[in-house]
Image: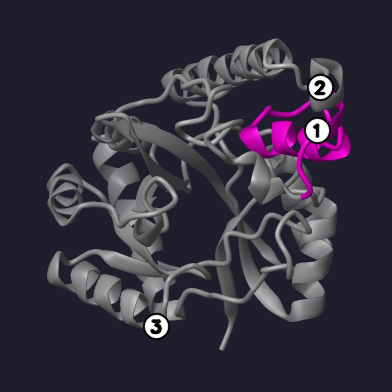
Amino acid sequence: MPGIDLHVHTRYSDGTFTPEEALSLAGELGLDVLAITDHDTTEGLAEAADAGASRGIRVVPGVEFSTVRNGEGVHVLCYFMDAEHPEFAAELTRLQEDRFTRGERMVAKLQELGYPIRFERVRDIAHGGNIVRPHVAQALVEAGVVPTLADAFSDELIGSSGRAYVEKHALEPLDAIALIHRAGGVCVLAHPGTFRETTPVPEGLIDELAQAGLDGIEASHPEHTPEVEARYIAKAESLDLVWTGSSDCHGTRYEPVRLGVRTTPPEQFERLEARARDVRAARAT
């Protein structure tokens, strides 16, 4: 049975692996298909495609959008899109620019609170890619402010209600779904059991997303218990959606390395591909 992991981050967002390193490990693990889904950027896709081709691993182009509904984050995975679609590319540019200024503002708040952190170091940690909260958290660990990355996500520091937290520009989830479809892609609700890090995505919102054209639900995820996974598989089936399984690998940022610990059944991947073909066919008419 092929190994299909549809949720992997590289250092172009908040992962620690280069695309080459991610594909190298995928080869060692016997994975056949890998989706690179960095936050709000497609910058690593060409590098990943080259690394995959040299190893006989199919690379699915993807992006993870951090959308917001009523102040709460809803992550939407995008696959098979046309990354050069003008509106799609423009939105990614806007998101990336916002992440940069957001990082600056969070560091400024931390400095005002008396913490010895520099934005230059945050940029270095990000390797010139998108700046995300784990990069700020790593700088706090290096500065001796907290012992672990998790400790940085507190009410004192950069947790969702933290004193140094800054909201980011984000699409409304229904707008993200529409944009992804206009760019010829399909969309999957990411890790619905970890809404705003603590609670599940409301059932009513999942129904609303499905009515708006959501293509699938990421039912199998390292942070979903077997009971939660079974519930989301049933939910996807009840709505005639694809269900996927993915590692949400961030390299060595979270231990142990997750790559391949959750995978998508081949028949579900085939359904996702079929939906992508239908989206592109509808777009062409």
Q: Position of residue 83 (x, y in %)?
A: 54, 33
Give residue 52's position: percent from left, percent from top. Answer: 75, 60
Asked whether the beta carbons under mark 1 and mark 2 sit within 8 Å of each other, the answer is yes
Q: Which amino acid type corresponds to the residue marked 2 in the rendered image?
A: Ile
The residues colored magenta run 123-147
Quarter of the image holding residue 23?
A: bottom right
User: Farthest residue toward the bottom?
Assistant: 1
Disc 1, SS: helix
- The disc placed on residue 226 is 3
Image point (78%, 44%), residue name? 47
Does residue 65 appear left or right of residue 10 in this picture? left
| Picture disc at residue 117 | 2
Under mark 3, the amino acid is Pro
Q: From the viewer's perspective, is the residue at label 3 or at label 1 nearer? A: 1
* Residue 133 on the magenta segment: yes
Q: Gap in Å between the C-alphas at discs 3 and 1?
A: 35 Å
Asked whether the residues under the numbered discs 2 and 3 touch, taking CB atoms below 8 Å apart as contact, a structural biologist would say no
